[in-house]
Image (tube, helix red, strand yellow):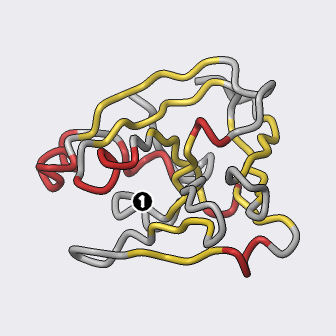
Amino acid sequence: MSAETVIHSGGCHCGHVRWQVEASPSVVAWSCNCSDCSMRGNVHFIVPSAKFKLIGDSEKFLTTYTFGTHTAKHTFCRVCGITSFYFPRSNPDGVAVTFKCVDSGTLRHIEIRCFDGRNWEKSYDQSSVSSFSKLSGESHHHQ
């Protein structure tokens, strides 16, 4: 992973939810097979919360769905229903950004890794997913 970062812009289908995220132009995205991600076809990269910001009045168009442990906060647009980002159980200090909701032009490379959300605890323990929401200098390694 390069230390270079860019500002990615993105949002939902109808445009009521817009955001910016600071991340590398090359990201590791997670394809999760949990019941929610697999139904939505969600593939996302994770950033520290401090690197993500909602734009304008996006907040008023968001609603949240939770299930199971209620740790993950699955946010989606109340108008078009698209989950362009959410707050993942694996990274409560981070934001999971749906890579297909990033405006074209700033993502150069996407490495897709699998996360076995059906066996969440085992996959969490065996993956490096929790390190992806740490700010630089918080001793993390993207393996």
Residue 52: image quadrant is bottom right
Question: Looking at the image, which is closer to me, 61 or 136?
Answer: 61
Residue 66 picture location, percent across and down: 36, 76
* Numbered disc 1: secondary structure: loop
Residue 129 placement: quadrant = top left
Tag 1 residue? 91
Where's residue 26, x and y in %? Answer: 63, 24
Between residue 131 and residue 84, name the one nearer to us: 84
* Amino acid marked by disc 1: Asn
Residue under the image location 58 percent in, 37 percent down: 99
Closer to the camera in the image, 65 or 86 = 65
Q: Classify 10 Å Cα crowding around label 1: few (below 14), some (14-19), many (20 and above).
A: many
Identify the residue at horizontal 39%, vertical 41% (top origin): 41
Q: Residue at x 19, y 40 (%)?
A: 126
Residue lying at 56% horizontally and 62% vertically, measured from the top left: 81
Q: Position of residue 24 (x, y in %)?
A: 68, 32
Using the image, determine if residue 107 lies above or below residue 117. above
Query: Above or below — where is 44 with respect to 80?
Result: above
The residue lying furthest to the right in this view is: 56
